[in-house]
Amino acid sequence: MNSLASLILAAVTATAARMPSPQTLPVIAVAAPRATLALQVANTEQERETGLMGVTHLRAHTGMLFVFAQDAPVEFWMKDTLVPLDMVFLSANGTVRSVASNVPVVAATTPDAAIPRRAGTAKYVIELPAGEAERDAIIPGVHLPVESQTSLQ
């Protein structure tokens, strides 16, 4: 392993140790235009359903990558999500299709039917702290190299 790869792996490992999550999931490094993202990988239905529920803070450049079996319509809702998020919907080849920015937190008393949902067509969805997509220049058309790192599925 070359020294740059060793440095990136060390940085991702250190960041993963500080990532607040109710789950212990594998973490990958994904290069965005202006930052390297440390993303927990949610591959199973249970991991995707739990997602970032219960997390009260996300550090800059950290989040979760949701991996689906196929590139198809997906829908997310924000039940028990305690931090505002950006949601990035990606194609099977890692191209950003759309970004739902600043998805708000909802009160715990909000009835399930009234909880906001965000939908798109995706093989992968990335959740980041609100405002992160814009800061890291993640916009439709940008390629994020996630497909080569998700053989964990």
Image: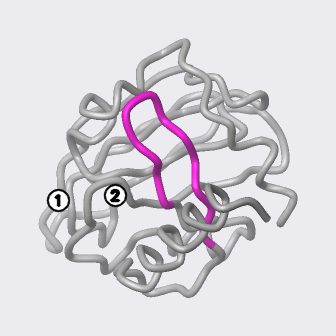
Which residue is under mark 1? 106
| The stretch drawn in magenta includes residue 51 | no
Q: Quadrant of the N terminus?
A: bottom right
Q: Quadrant of residue 34?
A: top left
Q: In the image, residue 53 lies at what x, y percent?
A: 37, 74
Q: Callout 1: helix, strand or loop?
A: loop
The three-letter code of the residue at mark 1 reads: Val
Residue at (21% x, 39% y) in the render = 131
The three-letter code of the residue at mark 2 reads: Met
Magenta stretch in the rendered image: 27-38
> Mark 2 near mark 1, Cβ–Cβ under 8 Å?
yes
Q: Indicate whether 32 appears above or below 139.
A: below
Residue at (53% x, 77% y) in the render = 13
Residue at (70% x, 27% y) in the render = 91
Q: Quadrant of residue 100?
A: top left
Image-based side of 92 in relation to 104, left or right? right
Q: In the image, residue 147 lies at what x, y percent?
A: 78, 41
Which residue is under mark 2? 78
Q: In the image, residue 99 lies at what x, y percent?
A: 40, 28
Q: Quadrant of the C terminus?
A: bottom right
Nearer-the-camera pick, 83 or 13: 13
Label 2 vs label 1: CA separation? 7 Å
Q: Callout 2: helix, strand or loop?
A: loop
Q: Quadrant of residue 123?
A: top right
